Amino acid sequence: AALVTVLFHLGEMATATQSLDEETFELLGEELGYKIQVVSPEDEERELLDSFDIDLEAELEAEGDEELEKRAAVVTVMGHVDHGKTRLLDAIRNTKVVEGEHGGITQHIGAYQIGVEHDGRDRRITFIDTPGHEAFTAMRARGAKVTDIAILVVAADDGVMPQTIEALNHAQAANVPIVVAVNKIDKEGANPDKIRGQLTEYGLVPEEYGGDTMFVDVSARQNLNIDDLLSAVLLTADAALDLRANPNKDARGIAIEANLDKGRGAVATVLVQSGTLHVGDTIVAGIAHGRVRAMFNENGDTVEAAEPSRPVQVLGLSTVPRAGDTFLVTDDERTARQIAEKREAADRNAALAKRRKRISLEDFDKAVAEGKVDTLNLILKGDVSGAVEALEDSLLKIDVGEDVQLRVIHRGVGAITQNDVNLATVDNAIIIGFNVKPAERVAELADREGVDMRFYSVIYAAIDDIELALKGMLKPEY
Ligand code: GDP
């Protein structure tokens, strides 16, 4: 943090989460006679919590074995599209959710817990209700480890497909044991043995072939062998993992889903990973903070307390956390708010730093003068194809001068999408929206990534701006 301050005084906006400029850091440091240490986001977070006297690692170490109690395994369902992930999650939920007061009317809150009898004992398993490895990997990218076991669904009539392999790779990269559900065995042409052979080639060797991966043939549609699949999950958990946590302390965990509800405000589903969460606790989750006003389980029943591996919907947060944000309980509301505010400031700085590196229409001429760019890359999106074509034609007619080029790298009809923003990030492009706007989520992404988006409803206004920008005469908007 001290280095960031020094750089700041040198007129260099930087944050500790910026990785691209590590070399710059080091060079600058040498120049100044500083020994440089690049600070990772994890270090930064640790330092932040440390300044509030919260030390997660010391707390974990201080925990005696006798404090730890068994907790339910947390399972994610992955696999190729249409192989039956959603159907399987539904089948498991419908047959096994522990009945609620309202007769088990289940709601989608992002995760659910089921009860099963296994080996004469009552056991529980928690399922993440968003199938696919994308959510799993997005959360991992944020440093969150949510999943203990992955169920890899493969349709027996279709076989191993690209996303099957992708899911398998993602699970293995995260060191998560896999149970294979060979689905759709009710279908004609289903060939479960073929699946076993195919997956063996990828290192998932079935137990019956002498390996250590459990394969279970199921039909999500006909509810066939669902119990066997759940047994396989429990056996795998017992054999490969020691799933324990201390329930007798303040809760920590991860936000897995959140949305803004008109009547209820921010609604977030969190997964408790250790400790017990109580109504009335003060929590901070990413940049959201607040007092837990009420909690609900997957049946819509209110709950007073949530133990490790329990997903609960939480009301009372100031805003929506992101999937994968960690949450923790603080001593008081002030601390929660301050932690959230510091994180928000750090996020803003990171976005600012990124923005400085990205091209914007206002400082395009400056970037040209500094020799950083010689091409203005544009992405055009409009409400109708005629407008997009007309805009492109007019843009390409602009007299850009000798030293610069103007390129339209992508054009399309419809709202500005996440994909457009990603493309702009990669190719350092500016997005022009003609009578179209991005969804809120997409606007947020563009803001975070520092992508310049401009919106117009008349063509000549767009042309004017581009011409001015090329001359270095576009005035910044505030
Ligand atoms: P996902 O994309 O992996 O989530 O797949 P879905 O759960 O949406 O299932 C895709 C299609 O396969 C749907 O039409 C399901 O009804 C069907 N399906 C899923 N499981 C089975 C099964 O066990 N047997 C049969 N015959 N169809 C299934």
Image (cartoon, rainbow, N blue to C red):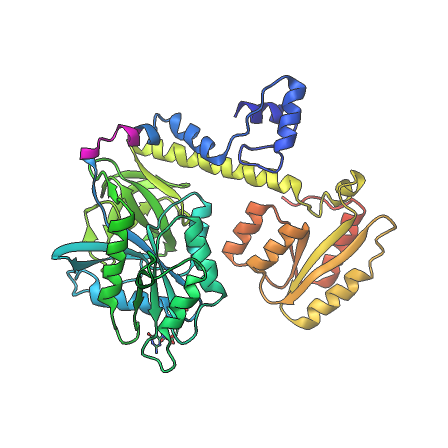
As drawn, is 440 to the left or to the right of 53?
A: right
The image quadrant of residue 384 is bottom right
Q: Position of residue 283 (x, y in %)?
A: 31, 39
Give, as a single range, the part of the protein colored magenta.
59-66
Ligand 1 positioned in quadrant: bottom left
- Return the residue nearer the eye: 66 or 98: 66
Q: Position of residue 65 (x, y in %)?
A: 21, 34
Q: Main structural element of the magenta stretch: helix, strand or loop?
A: helix
> Which residue is situated farthest in the right direction here?
402
- Please give the name of the residue rendered at 59% of the width and 67% of the height, measured from the top-left corner: 414
Q: Position of residue 287 (x, y in %)?
A: 42, 41
- Please give the name of the residue rendered at 14% of the width and 57% of the height, measured from the top-left corner: 119
- Return the residue nearer the eye: 415 or 128: 128
Q: Is residue 236 above or below residue 331?
A: below
As drawn, is 201 to the left or to the right of 5?
A: left
- Please give the name of the residue rendered at 78% of the width and 63% of the height, measured from the top-left corner: 394
As drawn, is 115 to the left or to the right of 133?
A: left
- Please give the name of the residue rendered at 41% of the width and 67% of the height, measured from the top-left corner: 197
Q: Quadrant of the C terminus?
A: top right
As drawn, is 348 to the left or to the right of 53?
A: right
